[in-house]
Image (cartoon, rainbow, N blue to C red):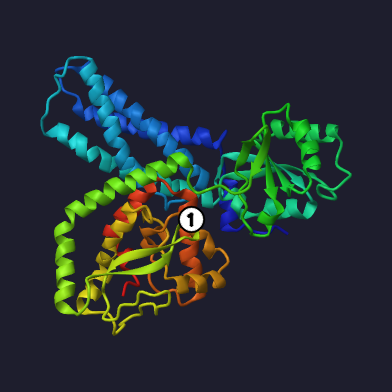
Amino acid sequence: MTIPMTQTEARRRRRFRLASRATLGNGIGAFEGFVAALLSLMLSYAHEPLLVLATALAAGATYGVLASGAARKFLAYSDLRQPFALHAALSWPAAAAVAFLVALAASRWNLAWGRTFWVWLFITPVLLTALRVVLYRQLARMLAQGQLQVERFGIIGEAAAVARLRADPRIWQHGGQVVTSLILPQGLSSPLPSPEVIASFARKCIDKGCQHVLLIGDLDNLDALSQIVAPCRPFALNVLLYPRSVMQERKIDLVDIVPLASVNSVRVLSTPLNDSGLLLKRGFDIVLSLLILVLLSPLLLGVALAIRLTSPGAALYRQERRGFNGRNFYIYKFRSMRVMEDGRAMRQAQTNDPRITPIGRFIRRTSIDELPQLINVLRGEMSLVGPRPHAISHDDELSGKFELYAQRQRIKPGITGWAQVNGYRGDTSTQDKIEGRTLHDLYYMENCSLLLDLWIILLTVFSPRTRQNAH
């Protein structure tokens, strides 16, 4: 009797096999660069055809290199929430600048500056961004259906763990395929297979085109790990430890090997940003905060005056919040309520809260009440983008309801954040809302970059989802 295949299984049969993620990423980048070069030929005037060709190639090559990096990152995570469209739009000015430099280096700047030139300069990034959105959505769909195979794995571990990993959709949904395995009857406990058996397995992995060997186990038996890794050293394989805790849905990132004095150590937890990343983020915060304060100073003064005229009390208030590494600080906000609660305990605002003034309702819905926190950013207590800080009493309560919540303090709190632009703003009365906000904040911590920060700021201003649950 023939059992009919499901639609997903049928799609997986139509699998496209590529050498590696890097190969596919570079191919995508080359294609995007080729399209950019073709669009650049809109500058093709009769005066200097060779110069036009050179500038088109320069623009296409530059854009292609930048697009390759974006494609490789996308293929590593298959996450459409990353600001890849923004990356495309920002990559074009760099490509156009290189094209201009090529023309200047030729010392023959005879290009016409007519309407077609301006169409090329401003319409091209729109077309390239649209191309990337369509292309990445198609790639994400193919990956989710298991139609793209860009990595092959061999697995070493106990039979039950190997079987679970083989069946795990997270493998094939990210372009992976398990092609062979070596069963350890007792895991990393003795007796282990002989070096010859392990070397034969490594050779089999190479013959089947594997790039990685996943070793399922834990760090409690380093001698066994060494015995398994040693026979694999003659082969060009990445041997990756896949902790058993991951099989139990507890994520542990073994980042890399770190030099510590005269020995090496395995880093099992990494800070969200290294020193360079912290410096770049701090510079970005200072420059943009000063710019916003200068540009919006009339608005800020007008809001402060409106608050003073419509209800008794100061325009600004401060409240103690928990920040980076658990250090408390005082956050500044425009007063939006008739009652000023500036202690550790407070009642969270609710829909149609009678304490909120008419002007307060407007500034809360538009997030204008948060703008005084630019002062906190300049003082180094906050960042423009990061997990939103809560009142101390709320923080203690939420930490007890979700064990991952406390991890949010591993990075500076922000005026806006990834959770807020995805609809997790305001009310945290249910477990789903607590976990949703926390997991979005942790996602940001794992993927934070200046480009993502800029994308979140743009979404904060323009996306209607940001204003969901605002009251």
Residue 103 vs 40, above or below: the answer is above
Give the quarter of the image for residue 299.
bottom left
- Residue at horizontal 22 percent and vertical 71 percent from the top: 315
Q: Nearer the viewer, residue 297 or 212?
A: 297
Q: Amino acid at mark 1?
A: Tyr
Does 331 sit left or right of 19 as displayed?
Answer: left
Q: Position of residue 248 (x, y in %)?
A: 68, 59
Q: Which corner quadrant holds the C terminus? A: bottom left
Q: Residue furthest left?
A: 114
Q: Residue at x 20, y 39 (%)?
A: 122
- Image quarter of residue 15: top right
Q: 54 and 346: which one is in front?
A: 346
Q: Please give the name of the residue rendered at 40% of the width and 42% of the height, measured from the top-left corner.
A: 279
| Tally of numbered discs | 1
Give the residue at mark 1: 443
Residue 113 appears at what percent x and percent y?
11, 28
SS label for mark 1: helix
Residue at point 77%, 49% (across, down): 220
Towards the viewer: 53 or 64: 64
Which residue extends farthest right?
191
- 119 over 396 or under it: above or below: above
Image coordinates for residue 272, horizontal then vertical, percent: 50, 49
User: As drawn, is 288 to the left or to the right of 200?
Assistant: left
